[in-house]
Image (tube, grey):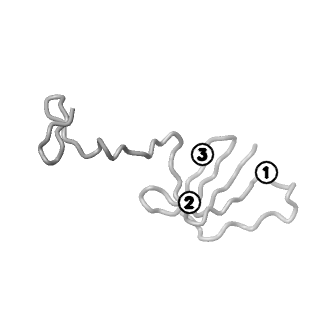
């Protein structure tokens, strides 16, 4: 089995957690312990890689995080876009 431990990962709600990924899938999500566990004296003795994310935000894959500012602030009424100032947009 191939495993990676991501320590001090920040979730969307602000919680810090330690995430373990085993064979490409999340296998554990636990509250962060603050510091990563010590690596084995012999690096070949374990398949666990440890990466400290230092509080960086972790989001699911394929999250579309952009917006179109030219159209994001419109209200739709009966299928027609209306700008906040009342003008018909589309």
Which quadrant of the structure image shows residue 80? Answer: top left
Q: Nearer the viewer, mark 2 or mark 3?
A: 2
* Residue assigned mark 3: 26
Q: Position of residue 45 (x, y in %)?
A: 85, 55
The label on residue 9 is 2
Q: Residues within 10 Å of mark 3 (few under 14, many from 20)?
A: few
**In the image, residue 20 lies at what x, y percent?**
63, 52
Q: Which residue is mark 1?
A: 47
Q: Which residue is at 16% across, 47% downward?
A: 84
Horizontal side of 24 relative to 69 (left or right) equals right
- Looking at the figure, which quarter contains the N terminus? top right
| Quadrant housing the C terminus | top left
Q: Nearer the viewer, residue 67 or 18?
A: 67
Q: Residue furthest bottom?
A: 34
| Residue at x 64% of width, y 70% of height | 35
Q: Earlier in the sequence, mark 3 or mark 1?
A: 3
Q: Is residue 83 above or below residue 39?
A: above
Q: Tag 3's secondary structure?
A: strand
Residue shown at 16% from the left, 39% from the top: 82
Of the pair 45 and 10, the residue shown nearer to us: 10
| Residue 75 location (% of width, % of height) | 19, 41
| Most foreground residue, 71 or 52 | 71
């Amino acid at each position: 089995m191939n495993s990676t431990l991501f320590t001090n990962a920040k979730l969307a709600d602000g919680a810090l957690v330690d995430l373990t990924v085993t064979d490409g899938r999340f296998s554990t999500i636990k509250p962060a312990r603050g510091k990563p566990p010590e690596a084995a004296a012999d690096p070949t003795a374990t398949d666990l890689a440890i990466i400290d994310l230092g509080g960086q935000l972790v989001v699911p894959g394929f999250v579309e995080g952009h917006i179109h500012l030219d159209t994001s602030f419109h209200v739709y009424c009966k299928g027609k876009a209306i700008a906040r100032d009342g003008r018909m947009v589309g």
